[in-house]
Amino acid sequence: MSISQHLSSSRSSRSSNKRLSLTARFSALLVLAVVLPLLITVVGSEVILRPTLLSQASTEMGNDAQAHAQAIDALFIARLQDLGYLRQFFAIQKYLSGDAAFKQQALNELAVGFRLDTNYTNWSLLDTQGKVRLFYPAPPGNRGKYSIPPEIMQQLQTSNKAITSDVYFDENTHMAYVDIYAPVISASNKLLGFERSTLGLNDIWTAVNNETNAAPGSYAMLIDNHGVRIAYTNPDTTLTTLPQALFKAIAPLPAPFEQRISDENLYGNAQRPVSVLDDPLATQLQNPQGASTFQLTPALQTEPFQVYRVSCQAVPWTFVVLRPVNTITKAANQQDFYLLLLAAVITLLAALVGLLVGRSITRPILQSVSSLLASSQMLKTLAAREQATATEQKWIVESSQVGLKSVQYYTEAASVAARKLDEMSTELAQRWGGLDIQRAQHRLSEIVSTANYIEKAVSHQEKSGKSLSTAIRITTQVTEQLLSGATSANDAATQLEDVIDQLRKVVGQ
Amino acid sequence: MKMFVRWDRLHSLLPGLLILPILLLTSCSGMSINMTNNTGNLPSGAGGKGCTKVGVLLPETTSSVRWETKDHPLLVQAIKAAIPGVQIDYSNAHDSSATQLTQAEADLANGDCILVVGPHDSVAAASIVEKAKAQNVPVIAYDRLIQSKDLNYYVSFDNVKVGQLQGQYIADHYQEYQKAGITPNIVVISGSQTDTNALLFSMGAHSVLDPLFANGTLKNVAETFTPDWIASTAQAEMEADLAQQQNNIQIAYVANDGMAGGVITALQTAKLNGKILVTGQDATAEGVHSILTGDQSMTVYKPIAKEAQSVGDLVKALNNGSDIHALTNGVTTSTFDGGNIPSILDTPIAVDRTNIASTVIADHYLTKADICNGIPAGTDGVC
């Protein structure tokens, strides 16, 4: 940096310092010193606490969703096994192979199956054409236009596995259910017919409804592989009405599946036609390998939610838990609010304290400044006076020099005149007898002239003496003035020392 | 003036001062994230070949003492015999699936290259299989199936066979309890409906009994499942059946010895004990004692030593890299997700008063002291 730049910056720094008073700067510094740690805490909260809370909530939600998905898996695995084992029961196989003697025992075994889970509503045996041959406890109704939907029939004829249907809705019981099918195959590997159990989703709906207990505002849903919400937390705690989003698709459905819905009366379509309620979830669920947890504003909601999704293994369903971000970050929000409130109060107090302390610091400084100003004025007056005095003194000296020269001149002239008088007197005395009258008169005339000259010189000397006397008087006055000026300067110096003492007290040195 | 120069410097440092702690904090949190993500590259299990570290994970200690008193020592013995110098990491989940998963993760991190898992929960334990598969570590499900198509092997007893033995005993002995010219009435008291093994036992029994029901040889008058295998519930079920049938019951198919004890109590109240065929399972000391008193007719003995030995054989084959098919004989068990798991299903043994000495006593599964209390000396050549 060049000297000129340094001077310039120094000047600008000085000018910027001038913008704020010391009191204001002191207050600002105090406020900063007090508020800074709070601000760091707030920023820390934003950077660390908030993500930590979100992470913790995601973990909780993940555990919750995992537990629910695992429970659904366990339920369906057990129910698939029920059917898988019951289809191997001897009487069932014999009855479906055409031995009517086993009818009662086959019925007993259907009853055994029915009692394996309280959510079973029906067990039945169907022949290879899909016609119901035996049932417990009541004859099962059709699924839309079919006793067994064609897609399921096709799978059953080509696979030995138990199959879970899509979801149906019973308008009478107001409950969703699924059918589980398994082919009944003889020891000789011949297809004898099919066994079907009908399982109500009561427990699953209850679990989904209970999600509200997990956290305020939290809810859950179960979405099937077609993107239809098959379970949804019911805001109606009396459960007399169904949730608005239930059996609504999260994205438009393909036409063939819409046809299936109609043909098979899936989701209770006949009474409550399945419609689309677009949900940003659809984008996330399209990618099964995508993130398990994410944030979005779901359908029917107006605020962002943290979402955790888990895919079930035993059924092609996705369990989704949703919790308002606000409730998750509530602790951080509250902390931030209190910190900011605290910061505001402390800022106010610090500003007031800073103002008071600043004022107490600046008061002596200002007093010192006033004193300095007075001293400065005094010194200025003194300087003016001394300048005048000096001018006078110069004039006096010059006058005295002139007077002195004049005195010297007239003294010398008087001396010359006196010497001349002496010479002429001596000559007259020596030549008194030989002098002619004219010469004597001439000499006397010269003596008179010289005496007049001396008289004039003395007169001039007197005048010069008077002038010198005046000069001496004036000099005396000037000296008095200088003395007075010195006294004033001493007073000013004393005053400055006082100011310095006061400033030292202010800065503590 | 100096003070203001310092203030100027401080002012320029302030953003730094503000950011520094944040950076420190974020770097700390970043560090913790890195640490949690740092699972590292664990050594491959090599499918168990050449394995010298085996993890054994059993499910609980509360509902049955067998896991600690029988299975644990027998498994350790069998595996040590299979792989000399093997290191065995044993753990018990104490009724917690989460604990069992943590224990399995620790075993895998420890370099165990074969896991023998008696799952606490057949569904939850699929996570263990998944993690082990990722490290090429074979998992042997012990006694209980793990519901995962990725499970490598399953060692248990043939539970259908258990039911068949019970049913066959009824088929062979019902006449001893039949009143002349009257079809014997039978009640079927199965185990817990939440336990798939109960269904397998029932399936096995029905495979024998259903033809007898169909041809009228026997009459099935009641069939129930007993939640949680509770003896007092079985007693209540039997009391209800006796009341409904006016004590006209000749046979009680009871799924295990514990519940058989409850049924016998109900029969004692009705003064019918010893007059009705009662089945059981597990060859418990109480069950065998009831056989000796005549209150219970039979039980099914599942020699745990044999089951543990099957695990030892499998571990040895894996260690050697030899053919497993020779051990499983092509037997598979299906899982819900379409898996067919190569299985060693050991055969259980029906035990009645004629073969107690040659089975449970001979195998040291039970001692005479366990079963002979109050039994006259010389009874059945056992006491």
Image: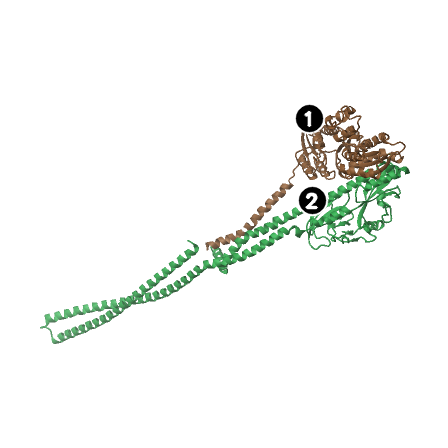
The numbered disc on residue B84 is 1
Q: Chain of mark 2?
A: A
Residue B82 figure quarter: top right
Q: Type of residue at label 1?
A: Pro
B132 and A182: which is toward the camera: A182
Q: What letter labels the chain drawn in green?
A: A
Residue shown at the point (83%, 33%) measured from the top left:
B251
Quadrant where the C terminus of chain B sits is top right
Q: Secondary structure at mark 1?
A: loop
> What is the drawing colour of chain B?
brown
Q: Is B136 placed left or right of B253 in the picture?
A: left
Whether the residues at callouts 1 and 2 have beta carbons within 8 Å, the answer is no
The numbered disc on residue A63 is 2
- Quick check: A88 above or below A34? above
* Residue at the left extreme, as displayed: A433
Where residue A325 appears, x then y in whole percent? 67, 51
